[in-house]
């Protein structure tokens, strides 16, 4: 079921940190309209790979294309992607609605349009009733939801989510996954979703890539023996 446009093409990417290989020869393709799961235990290289593909870090070797752009076209890439990083900092005294409106304006929306989009996004992640509250008063799960809303403010074609459900309660986890599913399905967005939870990936992803010690050890539809390999990697 991998028809559709390639959104992320990752070709033999390696990353060394002071001689230690965090990623080794990583290749895979992710498609528009699909959720691709990036699965692996702590330290497998998920965040490193996402940081490279979102142009925050440079690979030691290999290359990639995101939305058809090369690594040296970082501005083009940044304008077309939404990112929910592993650890995002938020200004504590800023109100949720103002953070998102500001973010929308950074991407060129006028005040009215940015405010409208911010209200919509806050509703989509279940934060309507807290939209005028300062972020410093938010729980961790609320900050996670806000992070997802922020990642979507520029109407991105490709969304990178680094463990977006970490710390959420089951209801929050479910609603975030539903939103991600809808993004890929109805808006034709490519989603790269990292997780260390097998059930999460099996429930939502069209394709899964498992990283183990920086290497791809699985790249297929989740039905094709994903759980066996995942258990091998994590035990
Ligand atoms: N800035 C850094 N300097 C040195 N080593 C690093 C750095 N960032 C990551 N690493 C190492 O690279 C490897 C991959 O780390 P990474 O954070 O990408 O893993 P991960 O799969 O995201 O793990 P987690 O599930 O814990 O978030 C680890 O061995 C880690 O120690
Ligand atoms: Mg990580």
Image (spheres, rainbow, N blue to C red):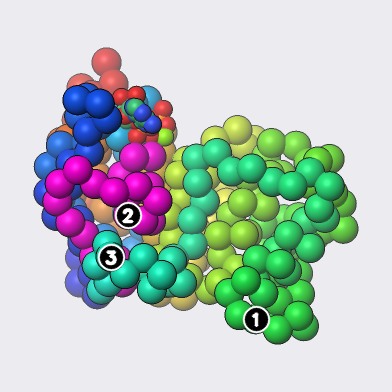
- Name the residue at 53% across, 73% down: 155
Element class at badge 2: helix
- Counting residues from the start of the chain, the first of labels 3 and 2 encountered is 2
- Name the residue at 79% across, 63% down: 98
The location of residue 157, given as percent across then percent down, is 42, 72
Q: Are marks 1 and 3 in contact (CB under 8 Å)?
A: no
Q: Nearer the viewer, mark 1 or mark 3?
A: 3
- Name the residue at 41% across, 70% down: 75
Q: Is residue 51 visible?
A: yes
- Counting residues from the start of the chain, the first of labels 1 and 3 encountered is 3
| Residue carrying label 1 | 109
| Residue 67 falls in image quadrant | bottom left
Q: Which residues are magenta?
A: 47-67
| 49 versus 122 height, above or below | above
Q: Is residue 8 visible?
A: no
C-alpha span from label 3 to label 2: 11 Å
| Residue carrying label 2 | 53
| Residue carrying label 3 | 72
């Amino acid at each position: 079921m991998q028809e559709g446009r390639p959104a992320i093409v990752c070709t033999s990417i390696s990353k060394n940190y002071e001689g230690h290989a965090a990623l080794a020869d990583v290749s895979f393709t992710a498609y528009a309209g699909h959720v691709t799961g990036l699965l692996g235990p702590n330290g497998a290289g998920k965040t490193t790979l996402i940081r490279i593909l979102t142009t925050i870090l440079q690979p030691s070797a290999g290359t990639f294309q995101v939305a058809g752009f090369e690594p040296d076209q970082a501005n083009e890439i940044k304008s077309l992607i939404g990112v929910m990083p592993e650890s995002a900092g938020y200004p504590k005294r800023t109100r949720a609605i103002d953070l998102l409106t500001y973010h929308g304006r950074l991407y060129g929306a006028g005040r009215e349009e940015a405010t409208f989009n911010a209200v919509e996004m806050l509703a989509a992640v279940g934060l309507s009733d807290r939209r005028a509250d300062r972020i410093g008063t938010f729980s961790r799960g609320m900050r996670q939801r806000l992070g997802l809303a922020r990642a979507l403010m520029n109407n991105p074609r490709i969304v990178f989510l680094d463990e977006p459900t970490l710390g959420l309660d089951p209801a929050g986890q479910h609603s975030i996954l539903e939103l991600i599913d809808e993004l890929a399905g109805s808006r034709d967005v490519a989603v790269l979703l990292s997780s260390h939870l097998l059930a999460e990936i099996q429930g939502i992803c069209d394709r899964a890539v498992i990283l183990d010690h920086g290497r791809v050890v699985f790249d297929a539809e989740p039905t094709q023996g994903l759980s066996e390999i995942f258990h091998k990697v994590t035990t």
